[in-house]
Image (spheres, grey):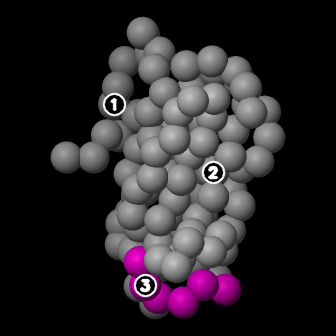
Amino acid sequence: MPIDVRSVPNSPLETLLGQNYPDPFNGISHIGFRLSRAGPVKLGVYDLLGREVATLVDGTLSAGDHEVRIEGAGLSSGVYLYRLQTGDFVQSKRLLLLK
């Protein structure tokens, strides 16, 4: 079962990447993640060939819970991967866009 960072208690903090919701989506979906410490963060969306199709976050964020939205406009229907990178933490998950 995917981790929904909204349902995980705030302490102790650990870095987590949640499953987007809704999934599959048509239009807009949300991705939640938790950072254990402030620092540089990159959250990108990639097609199955590994090409980055969207950058959702690329900058410094504070520790705690965060949520971003992805808009399906401009993307084709299909399976994509999103990847969170911060410090030594890297994790990817799948999302499905249906139009």
User: At x 53% / y 33%, what residue is drawn?
Assistant: 89
User: At x 42% / y 10%, what residue is drawn?
Assistant: 11
> In the image, what residue type sits under mark 3?
Gly
> In the image, what residue type sits under mark 2?
Leu
Secondary structure state at the residue bearing disc 3: strand
Residue on which the image places disc 3: 78
> In the image, what residue type sits under mark 1?
Ser
Quadrant housing residue 95: bottom left
Residue on which the image places disc 1: 7
17 versus 92 height, above or below: above
Q: Going from the N terminus, do you reach mark 3 or mark 2 first?
A: 2
Q: Residues within 10 Å of mark 1 (few under 14, many from 20)?
A: few
Which percent across, then down, holds residue 96?
Answer: 39, 74
In space, the residues marked 3 and 2 are separated at their CA atoms by: 19 Å
Q: Is residue 89 magenta?
A: no
User: At x 31% / y 40%, what residue is drawn?
Assistant: 3
Which percent across, then down, holds residue 63?
Answer: 63, 21
Residue on which the image places disc 2: 43
- State whether the magenta stretch is mostly helix, strand or loop: loop
In space, the residues marked 1 and 3 are separated at their CA atoms by: 28 Å
Secondary structure state at the residue bearing disc 2: strand
User: At x 44% / y 33%, what residue is drawn?
Assistant: 16
Frontmost residue, 20 versus 94:
94
